[in-house]
């Protein structure tokens, strides 16, 4: 587990640092990466995480799953959809692009004051912590944990890139690097905490078990939102986006071979 968490940290940090060194990473490429990671995350959630959690909790898992879906909706009030590529709402005031997603003032230079950067970082940090909890649980099937690490890693990559791009735009290179470093540590730390506390305390083990379907509900919200939000401005399903989704689903199905 330590090696997996270390790899997850490096994937998040190195991937998130790409906007610091390369200027050619545009929204179009990021959207394809998001479409792939979203479909992969959804596949792993439906193929591995849900069967495990329903086996552990029975029909009660559905309540936690539903709760997780709406908790992610609340978190999105802070992140404003950055975790699924919705960064354009923060720069509409600068580029005069009106997509109907932001109900704040779009006067020149005022959008960022209506959507504070710390709010986005706080929301993404909470989301990152939640993502780490299922990684620290011991599952019945051998391939579930490794598949989850792959799915979370695939999701963290574009998420970290989008966060870095946003901080870089308003705070500069040094602060972007520091925030990225701290952000990259959150999910591995949450995973290790869930593992250690779950093994030492029976109550914590139960709490972790309840949190897993909550996170699964959040994953479903994120993945399905990515399908609608990423891609063209009209939210059309282009052939490139379709290809990225099919690759994600294909890899998700391939993880069943781990079992």
Image: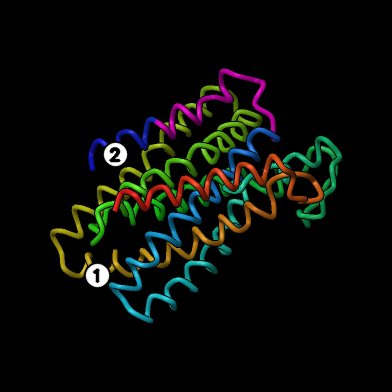
State the residue at coordinates (33%, 55%): 133
Front residue of 203/65: it is: 65
State how far apart marks 2 and 1 are (Cα).
23 Å
Indicate the secondary structure of the residue bearing disc 2.
helix
Q: Position of residue 26 (x, y in %)?
A: 69, 29
Horizontal side of residue 61 vs 243, given as left or right: left
Please determine whether, in this image, residue 223 is positioned above or below residue 251: below
At label 1, counting other C-alpha atoms closer than 10 Å, the crowd grade (few under 14, some 14-19, many 20 or more) is few
Q: Residue at x 85, y 47 (%)?
A: 98
Vertical relation: 60 (above or below) 114: below
- Which tag is nearer the camera, tag 2 or tag 1? 2
Q: Is-magenta flag for residue 141?
A: no
Q: Position of residue 109 (x, y in %)?
A: 79, 37
Looking at the rendering, the stretch of residues picked out in magenta corresponds to 11-27
Check disc 2: other Cα within 10 Å, few if <14, some if 14-19, many if 20+: some
Tell me the quadrant of the picture where the N terminus can be found: top left
Which residue matches tag 1?
206
What residue did someone put label 2 on? Answer: 4
């Amino acid at each position: 587990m330590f090696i997996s968490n270390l790899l997850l940290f490096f994937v998040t940090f190195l991937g998130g640092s790409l906007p610091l060194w390369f200027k050619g990473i545009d929204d179009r490429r990021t959207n394809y990466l998001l479409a792939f990671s979203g479909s992969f995350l959804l596949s792993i959630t439906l193929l591995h995480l849900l069967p495990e959690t329903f086996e552990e909790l029975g029909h009660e898992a559905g309540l936690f799953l539903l709760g997780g879906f709406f908790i992610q909706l609340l978190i999105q009030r802070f992140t404003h959809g950055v975790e699924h590529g919705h960064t354009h709402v923060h720069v509409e005031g600068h580029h005069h692009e009106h997509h109907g997603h932001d109900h704040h003032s779009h006067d020149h230079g005022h959008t960022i004051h209506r959507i504070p950067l710390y709010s986005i970082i706080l929301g993404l940090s909470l989301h990152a912590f939640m993502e780490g909890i299922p990684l620290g649980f011991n599952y019945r099937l051998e391939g579930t944990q490794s598949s989850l690490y792959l799915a979370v890693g695939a999701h963290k990559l574009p998420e970290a890139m989008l966060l870095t791009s946003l901080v870089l735009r308003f705070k500069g290179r040094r602060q972007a690097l520091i925030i990225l470093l701290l952000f990259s540590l959150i999910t591995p730390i949450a995973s290790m905490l869930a593992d250690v506390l779950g093994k030492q305390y029976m109550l914590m083990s139960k709490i972790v078990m309840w949190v897993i379907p909550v996170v699964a509900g959040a994953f479903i919200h994120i993945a399905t939102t990515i399908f609608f939000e990423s891609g063209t401005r009209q939210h059309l399903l282009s052939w490139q986006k379709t290809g990225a989704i099919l690759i994600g689903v294909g890899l998700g199905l391939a993880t069943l071979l781990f079992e």
